[in-house]
Amino acid sequence: MNREAFAANFKRPRMGRRLTALIISLTVMGMCIAVFKIVGLGTDPSSTFGTGLSNWTGISFGTCMLVFNLLMFVPVIRCDLSRIGIGTVLNMAGVGYIADFFQYVFREFVPENGLSMAMRLALFAASMALFLVAVSFYMVVDLGIAPYDAIPQLIAARAGKLGFRYVRMIWDLSILSIGFLLGAAVGLTTLVTGFCLGPAVSAVSGRVRGWFEE
């Protein structure tokens, strides 16, 4: 474990700006996940698993995501402490409950006969754009990554020639499949996050990374 790198996660340049961006991005991520769940066109792989587990157990989505992340947190700590930071903790403990809160609030505005397909697609497009930007900022502030994202990195580092891209694909598909088998919806949101998240992070980071440097 790299303890110096771990300590460095709490001593980044412009910490005030980084923490502000971190909190806003996590809040927006949770809000967008709530919209995804209401729209019913699927969610990202991690949230799909949490939704399926929530459906199966009857436990809230936020609690399921917290338990899921805690289980993954243990091997990350044991293998590479440098990937852990305040962003890791806030992500694993906060996003799921933020999603629960906003889903409760937004449900009050859903018509009794449900949303039309046009409304569902409009909400999907707006929330997806916000979600991609929020995740990009979460990555750019560089205050630690979620255990879900750290696990495939650790596997890839020990998998030799397989490479991170394929490890991440297998990881996402495995978690997604389990969530689907547990009753979660899989759809357009799942596809877009799978194909667009990487390019979005690259595009946004190139424009805003300077905001968080000395």
Image (cartoon, rainbow, N blue to C red):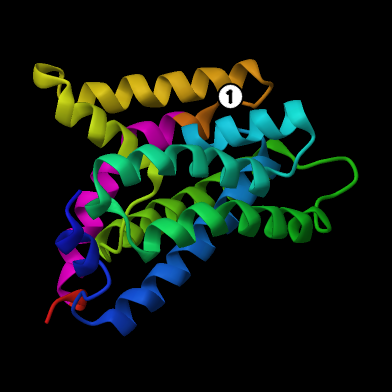
Name the residue carrying label 1. 179
Q: Quadrant of residue 84?
A: bottom left
Q: Is residue 84 above or below residue 76?
A: below
| Residue 188 falls left or right of residue 158 | right
The dominant secondary structure in magenta is helix
Per the image, is 212 magenta? no
Q: Nearer the viewer, residue 114 or 71?
A: 71
Which amino acid type is shown beneath numbered disc 1? Gly
Q: Secondary structure at mark 1?
A: helix
Task: Please state the horizontal and vertical placement of residue 140, each as a whole percent of the image.
Answer: 25, 61
Q: Nearer the viewer, residue 158 or 29?
A: 158
Per the image, is 206 magenta? yes
Task: Please state the horizontal and vertical placement of residue 8, each as a whole percent of the image.
Answer: 19, 68
Residue at 50% across, 43% down:
69
Q: Residue furthest right?
A: 112
| Residue 160 falls left or right of residue 83 | left
Q: Nearer the viewer, residue 185 or 155?
A: 155
Q: Is residue 87 above or below residue 185?
A: below
| Residue 61 falls left or right of residue 169 | right
Q: Is residue 155 above or below residue 115?
A: above
In this orientation, does residue 42 appear? no
How many other residues sit within 10 Å of disc 1, few (<14), some (14-19) or many (≥20)? many
Number of numbered tags placed on the structure image:
1
Q: Which span is picked out in magenta?
A: 191-210
| Residue 140 falls left or right of residue 115 | left
Residue at 65% across, 35% down:
51
Task: Please state the horizontal and vertical placement of residue 145, each as a whole percent of the image.
Answer: 33, 52
Residue at 53% across, 64% down:
27
In this orientation, does residue 128 appear? yes
Residue at 62% across, 15% down:
181
Task: Please state the horizontal and vertical placement of residue 21, each as a whole percent of the image.
Answer: 37, 73
